[in-house]
Amino acid sequence: MRMSYFYGTQADQFSFIRIPKELVVGEAFASLSVQAKILYGMLLDRMGMSYKNKWLDEENRVYIVYSLDEIQSDMNVSKHKAVDCLAELENVGLIVKRKRGKGLPNQIYVRNFTIAPVTSSV
């Protein structure tokens, strides 16, 4: 496959998903799969839109709504893999899910790993 180079302003034409370096090099996150780390970056990316939409709970915490179908589609993975990635993030404490019921997707709280943990539940 032959691909062209980027020229001038073309270099700035894509949006990117940022993954915190600590997730890649940090010992605390060594057990996470690369796909779970990418998903965490995607969840962080959605936080800005959630804030703009005023998706805040009663404690002023930002949450996102990202259905399993959307995750599957965005990451081009199976339902099983999407569930596994979410479980990995939940098991290390990077996310907390709150069920909404009635077939609605969960609210997902993306946790800030750079701040000392607090002892409150969702």
Image: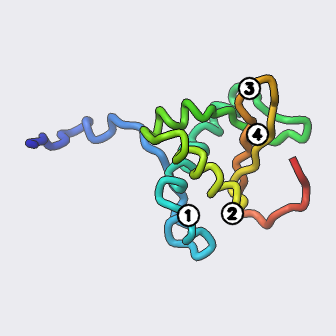
Q: Is residue 107 left or right of residue 36?
A: right
Q: Which residue is mark 1?
A: 32
Circle 2 residue: 92
- Above or below, 40 against 51 in this view is below
Amino acid, disc 1 = Leu
Answer above or below: position of 18 versus 103. Answer: below
Residue 87, percent across and down?
65, 53
Q: CA distance from mark 1 to mark 2?
A: 8 Å
Q: Are marks 1 and 2 in contact (CB under 8 Å)?
A: yes
- Of labels 4 and 1, earlier in sequence is 1
Whether label 4 touches label 1, CB < 8 Å: no
- Please state which of the two labelled residues, at mark 3 or mark 2, is closer to the viewer: 3
Disc 2 on helix, strand or loop? loop
- Looking at the rendered image, the disc whose residue lies closer to the viewer, 4 or 2, is 2
Calculate the distance from the C-alpha at mark 3 to the C-alpha at mark 2. Answer: 25 Å
Q: CA distance from mark 1 to mark 3?
A: 27 Å
**In the image, residue 87 above or below residue 97:** below
Q: CA distance from mark 4 to mark 2?
A: 19 Å
